[in-house]
Amino acid sequence: MTKERGLKRNLTNYGDKEFATYLRKSFARSMGISKEMLDKPIVGIAMTPSGFNSCHRGMPELVDAVSRGILAAGALPRPFPTISLGEVFLSPTSMVYRNLMAMDTEEMVRAQPMDAVVMIGGCDKTVPAQLMGAASADIPTIQLVTGPMSTGRHRGERLGACTDCRRFWGKYRANEIDTAEITEIEGKLSTTSGTCGVMGTASTMACIAETLGMSLPDTAAIPSVHSERLVAAEASGHAIVQLIDNPILPSEIITEKSVENAFRVLMAISGSTNAIVHLTAVAGRLGIKISDERLNEISDETPVLVNLKPVGEGYMEDFYAAGGLRAVLHEIKHLLHLDTINVLGQTLGEILEEPMDWVDRTYIKSLDDPVSNVGGLISVKGNIAPDGAIFKRAAATPELFEVEGRAVVFENLEDLANRIDDPDLDVEANDILVLKNAGPVAAGMPEAGYLPIPKKLAQQGVKDMVRLSDARMSGTAFGTILLHISPEAGIGGPLAAVENGDRIQFSVSKKRIELLVDDKTIEMRLKNKEPLKMPERGYRALYSKTVLQAPDGCDFDFLRHTSADS
């Protein structure tokens, strides 16, 4: 790390350092900043506002609050923009652009003159991208999340994006509500700034950032519109300045132990399946890998304690009022590595020394009365997924945990869209829906794993079916859905060999998914598959050529930690 501070850091290369400093100060003076302020250390603020990102609508206030904290602590704040990923405003899926944002964040932190940085994000792929960039740039960093939105109301019922949007859309597809009511609901699901108000991917990643130690304690769950969100922003600005003279780097905070803690919390909160891909990518930037076997051990040892949608009843505003992440950490304290440190230099053990005054057990259960005795997520393997797949058992139907069924296959997303509602589709309630070619290389791994119940079955009252794919699922979704099958069909994984009418056996207790077809037949089918047509130019070509599979976090191969980084 360079020893230079402030504006002398990361100088533009003119072949003359003194000239570069003189010229930089000259242009900085044009911004109306006094010479005295220009002599102070500099804190960058990675900000992500966008007209295409509703989750970040409160960004200007957060930037002002962080700046206030930085100035009060004696440094110069310098906000700078990076790519902003609005989950529902990106085609084909925001996942394609997570790595691009991570690169943008890392390179802007590396290139510009900042001694430390506060990263502000919230929407699903934004926080993982920022944490990935922070891990690689490895200068003092604090992650600040935008916070979850507050709930709306519809005919006496609380609503929150986006679990309720899926629930009502299912009712609409089943003809239980009409077009007028679904249009009315549309305007009541997302009524404030902030991220989805349930334990979806955004809220899960906020909890993970705090558990890792990259955010200030007690800041993950503060609602976006709550005054404490701005207080947390100011505190983040003040705290980051202390790290300039006494640096604690992301590489010292994100360790194998803190990553295990984060996976442990992921199980206890029954968080998003997406978090496994994202946390794996963040850890991979520092050469950390948690095996599928260890993941399952953690899950089987860790009870689900949080009663929030999509697997429970409450919303993030309830979680915050109930005691927040600290209350969860207290309950599973005996399972955590307590010697990990956070951005304040505190160990997790020190943070948890102070007892909780009160916890609302409606939303945060005790160890003696958990939502479930085992964690929300497991890794599943078998001949259809030799490198693994992910299953959210906490959001699934227990009656479908040990089944064998007939495969109803959709070759790709277009095939799914064209046939899922065909009244002549040959499908029954006890069949297994299979979607191929929706993995990272073939399709950018969209949130298409939540295959809709075929309309003719939905209208008969069918609420859930076993579904499996190499795609992802929204963290706000629910159902008996097997995801992230690896290797994906598009690169010749065995999923590509599944045909209509094949029998598939799924066992949660054995953590197995098996295609009941002999190995020779599978091999023969795979040999006859047409190779994917790959993009030929631009970022999509780079993505297709270098993206890794889900077990490696879908990061780019050239961005992962190497021995040369050590």
Image: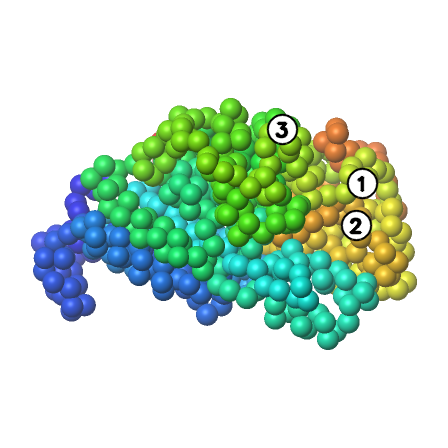
Kind of element beneath mark 3: loop
Quick check: 388 above or below 13? above
Quick check: 327 above or below 448? above
* Residue 85 percent location from the top left of the image: 48, 60
Quick check: 228 above or below 294? below
Question: Is 125 left, or right, of 3 in this rendering?
Answer: right
Q: Which residue is mark 1?
A: 400
Q: Which residue is mark 2?
A: 464
- Tell me the distance, in whole angstroms, between the alpha carbons under discs 3 and 1: 27 Å
Disc 3 marks a residue whose amino acid type is: Asp
* Residue 495 percent location from the top left of the image: 73, 44
- Tell me the distance, in whole angstroms, between the alpha carbons under discs 2 and 3: 30 Å
Kind of element beneath mark 1: helix
Viewer-nearest of labels 3 and 1?
3
Task: Report the residue at 72% width, 63% height from top.
Answer: 169
Q: How many marks?
A: 3
Q: Earlier in the sequence, mark 2 or mark 1?
A: 1
- Tell me the distance, in whole angstroms, between the alpha carbons under discs 2 and 1: 9 Å
Q: In the rendered structure, are the residues bearing label 2 and label 1 in contact, judged by CB atoms less than 8 Å apart?
A: yes
Task: Report the residue at 36% width, 63% height from top.
Answer: 61
**Residue 412's quadrant in the figure?**
bottom right
* Structural crowding at the residue carrying mark 1, measured as other residues with C-alpha within 10 Å and reported as few (<14), some (14–19) or many (≥20): some
Disc 2 marks a residue whose amino acid type is: Asp
Q: Choose between 120 and 438: the one closer to the eye.
A: 120
* Structural crowding at the residue carrying mark 3, measured as other residues with C-alpha within 10 Å and reported as few (<14), some (14–19) or many (≥20): few
Mark on residue 368?
3
